[in-house]
């Protein structure tokens, strides 16, 4: 298994994890349930750890795909630049989530402000990660790119030679 495999295995999980964590956190805040909020914080931390794997395997994945037909250097660079912001947002979210996890044994009113901060951070993190994923998808999924030109259809029918 090389870096490109690790990148492919790990790049969707943080996006979906943060999205799922947002839902759990909102549910926990609505129910005023510190244990449910703690579950969301744990999801954010795990998502951030997987995000680290996705980020640090990106360079190896780049070496595998950079010379493939249809892959452009500009698409890779744009994805790489935004991925750094996603990594930073994951780290910040994980740090605040760790603090939230430690404090989650307190009564809801004492941790409400921290929960709101974590919710805002998670929404920002999800947005940056979603953009990063979209840009990463454009590297190999040429149908997502604006500059994609479909190959001309052949007038020959399959089997006619």
Image (cartoon, helix red, strand yellow):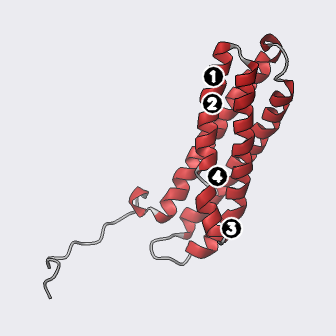
Mark 3 residue element: helix
Disc 2/disc 3 C-alpha distance (Å): 29 Å
Q: Quadrant of the N terminus?
A: bottom right
Q: Is residue 89 above or below residue 111?
A: below
Q: Nearer the viewer, mark 2 or mark 3?
A: 2
**Residue indicated by mark 4:** 82
Q: Nearer the viewer, residue 33 or 96?
A: 33
**Of discs 3 and 4, which sits in the foreground?**
3
User: Which residue sits furthest front?
Assistant: 35
The percent position of residue 49, horizontal first and vertical second, equals 74, 49
**Which sits earlier in the primary sequence, circle 3 or circle 4?**
3
Q: Point out the tag, 2 or 3, that comes first from the N-terminus.
A: 2
| Residue at the (61%, 68%) spot, across then down | 4
Mark 1 / mark 4, whichever is N-terminal: 1
Q: Secondary structure at mark 1?
A: helix
Marks 2 and 1, how far apart in space?
Answer: 6 Å
- Checking the image for residue 22, the label placed there is 2
**Residue indicated by mark 3:** 59
């Amino acid at each position: 298994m090389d870096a490109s495999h690790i990148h492919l295995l790990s790049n969707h999980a943080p996006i979906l994890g943060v999205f799922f964590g947002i839902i759990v956190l909102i549910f926990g805040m609505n129910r005023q349930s510190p244990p449910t909020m703690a579950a969301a914080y744990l999801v954010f931390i795990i998502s951030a750890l997987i995000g680290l794997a996705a980020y640090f395997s990106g360079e190896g994945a780049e070496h595998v795909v950079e010379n493939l037909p249809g892959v452009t250097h500009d698409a890779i660079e744009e994805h790489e630049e935004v991925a750094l912001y996603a990594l930073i947002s994951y780290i910040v979210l994980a740090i605040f989530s760790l603090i939230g996890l430690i404090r989650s044994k307190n009564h809801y009113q004492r941790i409400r402000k921290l929960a709101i901060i974590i919710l805002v951070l998670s929404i920002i993190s999800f947005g940056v990660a979603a953009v990063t994923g979209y840009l990463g998808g454009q590297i190999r999924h040429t149908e997502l790119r604006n500059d994609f030109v479909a190959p001309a259809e052949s007038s020959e029918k399959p089997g006619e030679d």
